[in-house]
Image: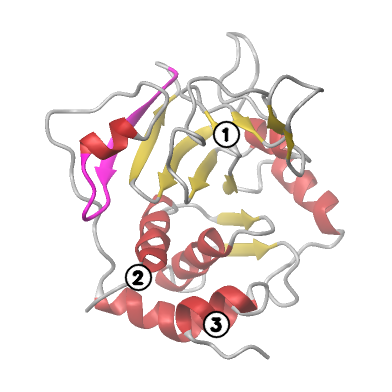
Amino acid sequence: MSFSTEELLISTITDLLDGVPSIAVGVSSPIPGSAALLRQALDGGTTRVTVLNSKNLQNLNDGVGDLFDRAAQGRIGAFFLSGGQIDGQANINLVGVGEYPQQKVRWSGSFGSAFLYYVVPRVILFRDEHTRRTMVEKVDFISAPGVSDPGVHRPGGPYAMVTNLCVFHFDRDRKRFRLTSLHPGHSLEEVLDNTGFSFDYGDATPVTPVPSEDRLALLRGDIAKRIADPYPKFAERVFSVPAA
């Protein structure tokens, strides 16, 4: 059965969420949101999922403030972050390009990313543009640091990064990414050419598993309908779910 790039990425992130009892998804995250719902479906509905700005997929009592409270209490097991720039120490930049504050490009800002990066145990970075423009040697501004100095209490931090080319896992002891799989049709040379930071890799890198027919059936059925609540344009484009 054929599958789209989005379906491959959703299935890949779903595997990274295995064993996480509670998952939260921020705004503008349709692929991570779909993966969280697929994980919930595969776990028989036991996984708790909340998607910000959703009418039916949000169980917060006091909006984002409640999300931060739960994260601080250790009640959020996984969250997703991204950035206009990401570097080899898993630092992310959500502020802009150039020397702060005189930056030539400005983005939306850091919001609560630094706090969540410190307290959520399994933070998955996601970026669907893997180029030297986004995967840089050193970010221009650190919105949220990937590593901390010795002695800093930090129960949370980067776990993995999924891009349109591959999957990395982050070694918190070595403070480096390691390439763990290449998406079908992509090569190590392509990843090296498009990555501005150095990373570890083995002699042979596995190919990212493709989504099974059962997963695709779930995605194109119940998950597509549910994700249309917060992300109607995404559901219509990827799953052909008509907009309400």
The number of discs equals 3
Residue span colored magenta: 175-187
Residue located beneath label 3 in the image: 236
Q: State how far apart marks 3 and 2 are (Cα).
A: 14 Å
Quarter of the picture containing the N terminus is: bottom left
Mark 3: few/some/many CA within 10 Å (<14, 14-19, 20+): some
Label of residue 85 in the image: 1
Q: Secondary structure at mark 3?
A: helix
Mark 2: few/some/many CA within 10 Å (<14, 14-19, 20+): few
Name the amino acid, label 3. Answer: Glu
Q: Is residue 83 above or below residue 192?
A: below
First-in-chain label (3 vs 1): 1
First-in-chain label (3 vs 2): 2
Q: Is residue 66 magenta?
A: no
Mark 1: few/some/many CA within 10 Å (<14, 14-19, 20+): many
Taking the image as shown, residue 57 lies to the left or right of residue 43, namely right
Give the percent coordinates (x, y) of residue 235: 55, 78
The residue positioned 52% from the left and 41% from the top of the image is: 122
Quarter of the picture containing the C terminus is: bottom right
Give the percent coordinates (x, y) of residue 229: 66, 79
